[in-house]
Image (cartoon, rainbow, N blue to C red):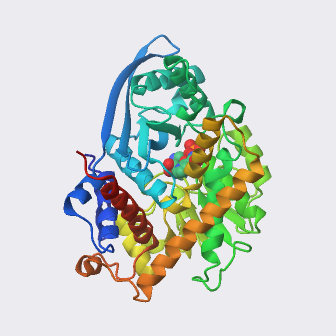
Amino acid sequence: MTDSKIESTSIVENLDPVFMSEQQFDRAVCFMQEIKTGLVEFLKKPKRITTTYFPIELDDGSVQTFHAYRVVHNRVFGPGKGGVRYHPDVTLEEVIALAKLMTWKCALMNIPFGGAKGGVVCDVKHLSEKELRRITRRFTTEISHAIGPNVDIPAPDLYTNEQTMAWMYDTYDVLHPGQNNLPSVTGKPVEMGGSYGRNEATGLGVLYVTERFLSKALIPQQQEVAGAKVVIQGYGSVGAVAAEAFVRKGASIVAISDSSGGIHKADGIDLDALAQFKQSHGSVVGMPDTMSITNDELLELECDILIPAALSNQIHAGNAQKIKAKLIVEGANNPTTVKADEILNQRGIYVIPDIMANAGGVTVSYYEWVQNQANEQWAMDYVIEKLKTKMYHVVDVVFDRWQKFVVGEEVPGDKETAECLCEMKPSFRSIALMQAIERVAKATLMRGIWP
Ligand code: NAD
């Protein structure tokens, strides 16, 4: 297990991803009325872990060994589903925690998939396109026995994209000739079986959950996206699309960042100019007419909505007291630590959790899988309308359940634990997770414990 910790003035925080995902799970479960003890153990553990080391010849003729993982957490509702990330900090613990998150995300969204995740320990910034292609093909080959259209379906994630998915699909197809392999991978280019709207899905989903949430009037002074000052951490697949979507709805992006740092402009950043600047300079930092800030400063800026859309553990015990946003919408997976959740809950700052906020990606991945099974391609407008309806619906479901606890119509099954976890007024994360865990637990028992 990793032993990374954050120390603030008074709180030392354990950032082990498995530890944190179990804490979130326990917190959610104490709101449920009943769950069998043995079942809790089953739902916490991954179903299957694949670990692999493989050698790759680099462009200079040298050989490097890479370390990679694919984890399936749960398959009660269907094949495993989850992204593949390429990052130097990938660990088995992180991949397990992210696979679990996918189980809850799919269950919450009522998508007939289980949870899975994969990762290769590598730094794409120091690899050529040819090296990345070789890594992708070899990784796919190493896990090819464990993935497939009805077994486990990879998709893009951090530092992987539709090109990576095209290589994964091609490799899988070569190894499994004579059958329709298009549904074995999602997030493919539209020219080869990808769905219209998949690239935009996660960022657009972030907008849809935000507008529906604001319309519930929990933040009286901010009941719509128009006029909101928005800060986004990350200018990748999720952050860049979300930025454009929020601006189209009348918000202004007052700060945005990438791995090199952030930029700030109080009256709103020009996104067209930003796209051109990033294209020519490789970073958002240094864009004319903006002020350079660090990623830490960006998170603590005065704003209405904060969207972390980059890495995990960005909002933690050390900075949660300094967050000034009224609402946090988790574009990234696990950007908020457990301690930070507690602090934000006590401070009355609402968090729309990752399993709702960034579920647009897996939703359209599911649409891609359905289209691939039928050899169809749906129109962009049709996909986006379906996505919007689904994202609005999930906010309504979680909000209604949350309200039942707030007014006392429902009470925590385990009041004592809820109390000592400082969650007598539940967070949206706990309620969304509870809703998902309830569905998976029920389905597990209905299928029957085997044999
Ligand atoms: P991406 O690789 O396209 O973009 C990541 C962005 O984060 C880049 O702009 C990068 O520069 C920035 N970044 C990296 N390190 C940073 C740092 N230390 N500080 C600030 N910014 C940093 O990845 P993505 O697909 O946009 O994924 C971002 C997050 O969203 C991840 O947590 C991922 O798991 C989650 N997510 C993605 C999808 C999807 O469909 N792509 C779906 C659900 C969740």
Residue, far left:
38
371 with respect to 48 (left or right) = right
Q: Residue at x 62, y 31 (%)?
A: 163
User: Residue 308's x, y, as percent?
Assistant: 54, 59
- Residue 109 position within the rendered picture, expressed as x and y whole percent measured from the top left: 52, 59
Seen at 36% across and 65% down, the residue is: 338
For this rendering, which residue is in front, 244 or 213?
Answer: 213
User: Image check: 321 left or right of 39?
Assistant: right
The percent position of residue 313, horizontal first and vertical second, equals 42, 57
Q: From the image, which quarter does the C terminus lie in?
A: top left
Residue at left offset 36%, top offset 50%: 97
Q: In the rendered view, does 74 fall on the left or right side of 363?
A: left
Kindly indicate the quadrant of the structure image that contains residue 214.
Answer: bottom right
User: Nearest the camera: 377 or 8?
Assistant: 377
**Number of numbered tags placed on the structure image:** 0
> In front here: 335 or 28?
28
The image shows residue 90, relative to residue 426, as above or below, that is: above
Residue 291 shows in this picture = no
Residue 198 position (above or below residue 86): below
Residue 445 vertical position relative to residue 418 in the rendered view, above or below: above
Residue 303 placement (x, y as % from top left): 61, 72
Question: Farthest bottom residue?
Answer: 407
Can residue 392 be seen? yes
